[in-house]
Image: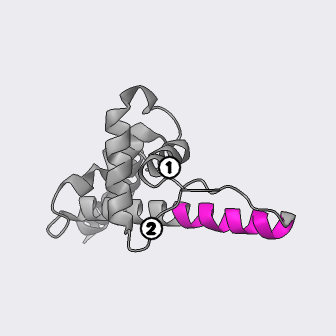
Amino acid sequence: MKRLWLIALFSLLAVPLAAQTRGYPEDSGNAFLRVCSVFDNNTDKLPAAEAENVFRCLGYVGGFTSGVVHEQRFAEAATGRKVPAAFCIQDGVEEVQMIRIVLKYIRDNPADAHLSTPVLIIAALRKAYPCQSQ
């Protein structure tokens, strides 16, 4: 029984350490590639560690893009003026598609992979979904 407790304790400690070495998608473009490249694979049958990355990336990109849109609306309401949008995502675009766009952008611009992930997401989505008129 004592060995079981030690194994459980080690397992609990190992998960955060493994996550720290891989980084989080918001750390940089390099971290985004490490964590979110799981979307290059078939996401239907993934090991548990990679499935965690799926949810981490989906949550981050979905939350980030929603936050950008809501911030624009808040700024417009607060100032009473039109605020330019960072990007104009069309209806029907899913988070998985946005993640793949960001992955491609970072791979196509490796010199910028050290930049913060929000900067890279905005650049990627602005290129993929430019606003027609502002």
Residue matched to label 1: 126
Secondary structure that dominates the magenta span: helix
Q: How many marks?
A: 2
Please say whether residue 122 is one of the residues in the magenta stretch: no
Give the amino acid type for the residue marked by disc 2 in the picture: Gln
SS state under label 1: helix
Give the amino acid type for the residue marked by disc 1 in the picture: Arg
Horizontal side of 13 relative to 76 (left or right) equals left
Comes first in the chain, label 1 or label 2: 2
Please say whether residue 67 is one of the residues in the magenta stretch: yes
Q: Residue at x 75, y 62 (%)?
A: 82
Residue 66 in sight: yes
Q: Nearer the viewer, residue 58 or 122?
A: 122
Residue 118, label in figure: none
Horizontal side of 62 relative to 47 (left or right) equals right
Q: Residue furthest front?
A: 133
SS state under label 2: loop
The quadrant of the rendering that contains the N terminus is bottom left
- Tell me where the magenta segment starts and ends, as one range: 65-78
Residue matched to label 2: 90
Q: Residue at x 36, y 56 (%)?
A: 99
* Image coords of residue 107 (percent x, y): 32, 36
Question: Dot 1: few (<14), some (14–19), or many (≥20) neighbours within 10 Å?
Answer: some
